[in-house]
Image: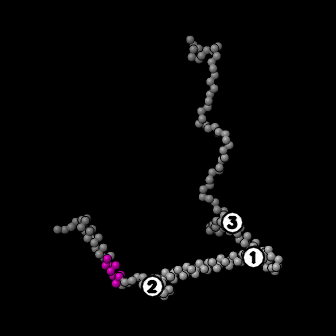
Amino acid sequence: MATPADSYLLTQDKAKEKMWLSQRRVEDDKIKDPDPLARWRKEREQACGKGPEAWVEWAKEELVKQEKEKDEKRMKETAEKDYAAWALKSSKVDPLEKTRYEALKELQKIDAAEQAYKEKMKWNPATETWEEDKPAFDYPPVIKPTGQKKESKFDRKKTVTEEESENEIPEDEQYL
């Protein structure tokens, strides 16, 4: 007895064979490299000590160091700004130092203006120039209400009906 080519038994056998092959590959990989994270663990141990607990402590210490460096940088910048403000107002400071801080203050204003200008502009790589950043959609103009109702062409016009006088003959009765 032969099995037809489109039989479900053949497709089922092929699926089982694929599953068996994939399981075999996984087992072979385990034999070749039983711990794929071993190299990573070794690097961590060399960098920060033994065991996962030491890694967590090392990571916390690194975060504290980074925060400390940021704080020191902020304190230095603040101290420089405060000294510059004092030097500009003080009469005890060397005039050359005073002019230096005035020039630095002007440079900061120019940099701030340039930054604001660049935020409004957009770099076009095709022309290699800064162009005004236009919105993708231009909104229609805003029309403020005047308080008067605008006549619509759909409104029915009111016709004034004239009252008939006694002397006139109605149109329907003219030929009688």
Query: Label for residue 117?
Result: 3
Query: Residue at image x 60%, y 56%?
Result: 137
- The part of the chain drawn in magenta is 23-31
Answer whether residue 2 is magenta in the image.
Answer: no
Q: Secondary structure at mark 1?
A: helix
Query: Residue at image x 62%, y 59%?
Result: 135
Residue 17 percent location from the top left of the image:
28, 73
Question: The C terminus is located in which quarter?
Answer: top right
Question: The N terminus is located in which quarter?
Answer: bottom left
Query: Residue at image x 57%, y 16%?
Result: 172
In front: label 3 or label 2: 2
Q: Quadrant of residue 72?
A: bottom right
- Look at label 2 and name its amino acid: Gly
| Left or right position of 122 against 90 | left
- Look at label 1 and name its amino acid: Ala
Q: Which residue is mark 2?
A: 51
In front: label 3 or label 1: 1
Q: Is residue 139 visible?
A: yes
User: As displayed, is residue 39 above or below residue 121?
Assistant: below
- Look at label 3 and name its amino acid: Tyr
Callout 1 crowding tier (Cα within 10 Å): few <14, some 14–19, many ≥20: some
User: As displayed, is residue 142 above or below residue 9?
Assistant: above
Q: Which residue is mark 1?
A: 84
Q: Say which label, 3 or 2, has the lower sequence index.
A: 2
